[in-house]
Image (tube, coloured by chain):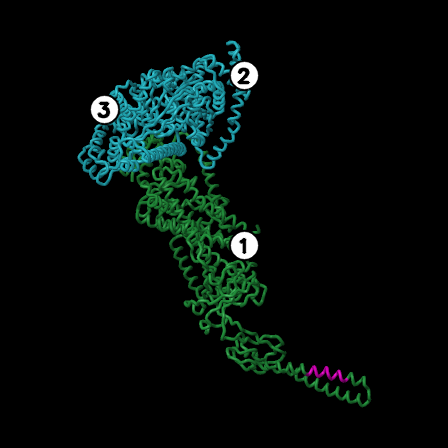
Amino acid sequence: MERPTFSPFWHRVRAMKPRLRPHVQITRQHYRGRRWHVAHDPTSNQFYRLSPIAYDLIGLLDGARTVEEAWKISLSKFGDMAPTQNEVIELLGQLYNSNLLSADASPETEQLLTRGRERVRKRVMQQAIGLMYFKLRLFNPTPILNFIEPILRPVLNRWGFLAWLGLLIFALVQIIPEWPRLVGQFDSVTSPSNWGWMILVYILLKLWHETGHGVICHRFGGQVPEFGAMLLVLIPSPFVDASSCWSFPNKWQRVAVGAGGMMFELFAASIAALVWLASPDGSFAKQISYYVMLTSGISTVVFNANPLMRFDGYYILSDLIEVPNLMMRSNKMLQHLFQRYFYRIKQARPPSNQPGEVAILITYGVLALIYRIFLFVVITLYVLGIFFFVGLFLALWTAAMWFILPIGKFVHWLATSPQLLEYRTRAILGTLGLAAVGAALIGLVPVPDYRRVVGVVDSPLITGVFQGTDGFVSDVHVRLGQSVKKDEPILTLSSPELSAERQFVIASIADARLKLAEAFSKDDPAGAAVAQSGIAALEEQLSDIARREAALVVRAPHDGTIVGANPRDLLGAFQRTGEPVCQVADLSQRRITASVPQGDSGWLFQMSPDEYRVQARLVSRVHQVIEATGLRAIPAGQRILPHAALGHAGGGQIATMPDDRSHRVATTDLFTIYVDVDPAQLADAALGQRVYIRFTLPSRPILHQAVEMLQKAVQGKVTL
Amino acid sequence: MSQALTNYATLFESLRSRQKKPLPLKGLDKLAAWLGVRVRTGRYTLSWLRKQAEAIDRELSPGLRSLGEAALADRTAEVRETFLRGRQDDAVVRAALAITREHARREIGEEAYVVQLMAAMALYRGRIVEMLTGEGKTLTGSIAAPLLAWEHRHLHVLTVNDYLAKRDADSRRGIYERCMLQVGAIQQEQEHALRARVYALPIVYGTPKQIVADWLRDQIRLGALRSAWGGLRMLGGEGVASQGPIVPGLRAAMVDEADAVLIDEAVVPLIIAQSRKSDEMAAIYRDAAAMARELKVRTDVTVDALRKQAELTRAGRAKCAAMFVQRADPIWRATRRAEELVRQAVIALTCYHHGRQYQIVDGRVVIVDEFTGRFLPDRSWEHGLHQAVEAKEGLEITADRETIARMSFQRFFRSYPVMCGMTGTAADATLEMEKTYQRRVTVIPTNRPVIRETWPVRAFGSAAAKWDAVAESVAALHAQGRPILAGTRSIEASQTLAERLTARRLPHKVLNANFDKDEAGIIAQAGHSGGIVVATNMAGRGTDIKLDKDARQAGGLHVILTEMHAAKRVDRQFIGRAGRQGDPGSAQMFLSLEDELLALYAKTAAASLKKTCNEPGELAGWKRAATLRLFAFAQGASQNRDRRLRAETLRQDDWVEKHLPGM
């Protein structure tokens, strides 16, 4: 590494007699076995980390020595290790810009103002960039902490920590056996009518969380100058500025401040768990304690403990592994690797030289990058689903700030960086090459395009058996799963009403006959005609009764097996006409039925069946792939599902209307498809069993697929 | 009393111009500023300028021609008064230009053409004006300058060298005095008190180097002073002349040869240095030079001639370490610093050549300016490089000098609220002018068509063949009675050519930094029939070679370029010495595959082309075409590199300005 001793700008600092501002505090910290000194300005909360040699140099600058004198002393002390002129200038410049250094006896008001303005501008810029993390500063919470912290002080020590740990473990041991009940409650408790309570619990819990950070920071002597609210992906959440803990010399104290929020929150969750267990079902306490557990559990696991985002977990990790400024430096490390090995810039300097630290930086950098992309996609899709336009705006903005801005900066760097002075042509060609390869991979290289739906096994011939008449089930002739021949009786009903009716009609006919004979005898043709028609009507009634009596024996409509409901359950019950008995299915033939959402069905009708391939896996034999022999689609959109198992209520993936009791009415139009497979494959598959179906469409470049996916997501939400 | 007032005014202005340091613009601000320039100056189009100029030519000038001297003086006073009060509008500006034009006509007998009036108008409006070489830039400048001087009280006219500053100031004095303006020229050898008097004049001619240096020295003198009141003691004390500031602020600047001043020379910032107290380093530099001679290029040390950097290989390091152990001085114990010294000695040995980068004059190393070909006697290289060169040449080693102030020319010129410029060749650098200086370039049409012939370029496989061909060509044209100007890139090359000409018994004069005393005489003779001048860049910009009658009849001046320069503009300037103001003339370029430009920017390509051609003599057909392409590429690369270096200088300057408190 070339480090020229001299700098052309040395004259700017040579004769200066700077010193640290009097109120700057210096603490000693150890990182990975090396000593560092952190300069901290409590008034502006600015930090600067000094290496031992830089610290020595700054120590020499006492306001009476010139920079040149100090540098010469440093040279004689450290030889080759001493900072070069360039490094001294850089150090002084950064300290000065962080407001840690006073360079002149007289205050440079104008420059102070300029720097102040610059800082505000930077803050505004950051705010704009992180629209997904909008921050609102509210007030200084020190008075509150001054009040709370002495109260909690007796437990803010290692005994308190052990007690907390004990409580946490106890609560976990108690709650884990109740897990299924806990999960079971989820749906009913989180229904929209309860959202008001949930939000209240959430806000209180988050305030409690921040109190944790603040109190512990305060406990170890740090200042907490700021309290505010942050809009995290549209969800408001409070925050405190506990950054003064960065100057704590003991790393465990820094970790404690970072973990304080989660510890307080988990404490609340443990108490809530015990309350939940103790309180009776349906009580208010049970409900609220459930919310507390839910909120603190999710927010701790998903957000706070995750070290890949800049939340508590990140700072805890950074302190634990003793790599300060982890995120920035790991980004720099990746950039460095790129510059060093892709552009082959010899002068590129890595942000760290220690092998252990380098490994950590690289690992972290890669993981954080992947996570960031993942998070972006997930959040975008989520928000798009809820508020389309807000989501679209947020997604575009975030894409701009997370991806386009860095790319722009990168292009600018490529075009103007003095580092690249001698390598620019190579760097630009290399980058264009890489971009071209990337674009080709995305835009040209075909990759398999899979579509997946869930279907069910059913039979092409399946008939419902219904009651033909009212009556009590007196006899059941079959069992569920028993095979029947056509017209084989299934049920026999007894209907006392019907037999009484028959008696009555027969009696009426006899009566009418008598009336007819009397009319003949009286030679009353008109009376005879009346009686005649009466007989005819009654006889008709009689034949109807006979038909209904015949229906008292319910018969199989065709050869098959009894499926669906068990007819035996009906024994002795009164059944009305039209009520279902069971189904008779012809199990010798089976097929797979599924529903394809209309939005994703273009290919279904545009492609000929030999262009794609269909495979199915039965739930019962997931390992076995069944090749389909054919596919038929019904080219009419409908909302009725072919089978209740496909809908949400039946455990399927298609949203159904919540107010429909059959659970077979979908919210959107669907196309029904039938997948034909070798019947032998389905011979022992239970009807109604779920089947995973995969369509392998012709391979297409990722770009095509992504565009189509996006179009689908937008479809129906924007009218252009 | 009035002297005290002047001094106070100087102090005040000097402080004011310090506090109005231009802010470096970045990102969108930069873009906005650039667009702003385009919008603000959008009114002054070529057709608008022509309309104004024609109005002056037709309506105003005829009336003035017949005016008596006294009446003209009255009119002048009246217009000047309007400018002083800041009440000038377009009509007054037209009237003023007509008056200065008339003064110029009466004084030197040349009346400005319409195109020159257009250019003068554009200058007044803060444009960089491009006029082809030989179109009378000097006259244009001298009719625009009075307006600027009236309006802004002090006008600095910046030229490329002292000779031109003096020549122009003297030749224009009459015009300016008629306009009630005094003029002076800053020269290198002037005393402090004299300089102060010159700067107090309304129009000051000088080179940017001198003016920037004076201004910087003023700033050093003012030190931590923050207001003019604080300077009262400075004024009252024992002689302002030695202590007070001498440049009364930066008000307005007119830059002659704007591209050279604003762009080419802006690569290297101006540095004011003072000798350090002697620090027994002489022996150390000698040791370093001795060690450097021990190292073998390529096996021990790799040298990058372009960046002027050397790097030790592993073998070289080991060799050095072994040598360091034998030396007693403690400096050789600190490996990094010791290797730095050796590397520097290697650079002095391999990248700096006598006759190119420097010349030994009276036992001292004197730097030769790359662009103007002149000596820079006050300058020295920084951080021990100068000493390393002295050690290499075995001269007495001077004390190291340390920088006390530094200013890039870009920043300096941006400190002028009003700036305009003239050049023959600005078009290549339009974008840079607009971006760096926020000045637009206006191209003024030519008055008379150029009838200069450009003969096809001749390319050779070896330098020797090239020099022979140049000498031969000189002989042939000399026989026709044409005056010849042969341009070379370095003093060394001019001497090589001179030797060949002597061998052929051709009478010639050599104009380079070694012989700059006769400059005016040589230039005056150069246009005579049969004159042969071999010159470095000194004869490039601004040199006006007047042809005599015989020479014109023989076909005018013939310019031979013996090498391609680092920037196309420099070539064009040199060629522009021929065919001025409608004179006949011709120009031809000679190149060889061993030229320095190729060695720096296309080393491997040039070497392989040379191998493939395998032709030491003149190249023809595809070989010539390939050579020309290679040269075009190398020149492009060199221009790009220089542009980036300038951007980098400016960026560093801005960084320091922003991050370091102070001066």
| Alpha carbon distance from label 2 to label 1 | 73 Å
Task: Give the SS element for disc 1.
Answer: loop
Residue B60 is labelled as 2
User: Which residue is located at x 34 percent, y 38 percent?
Assistant: A422
Q: Residues within 10 Å of mark 3 (few under 14, many from 20)?
A: few
> Would you name the residue on which mark 3 appears?
B396
> Contact, CB < 8 Å: mark 2 with mark 3?
no
Farthest-out residue, bottom = A521
Image: magenta residue range: A531-542
- Label 2 and label 1 in one chain: no
Q: Amino acid at mark 2?
A: Leu
Farthest-out residue, left = B326
Label 3: chain letter:
B
- Taken as a whole, is the magenta stretch helix, strand or loop? helix
Q: Amino acid at mark 3?
A: Glu
> Would you name the residue on which mark 1 appears?
A715
Label 1: chain letter:
A
Above or below, B621 relative to A382: above
For the question of whether residue B376 can be seen, the reply is: no
| Chain A pictured colour | green
**Which mark's residue is nearer the viewer, 2 or 1?**
2
Answer with the quarter of the image where residue B90 lies: top right
Answer with the quarter of the image where residue B478 lies: top left
Who's cyan, chain-wise?
B
| Alpha carbon distance from label 3 to label 1 | 84 Å
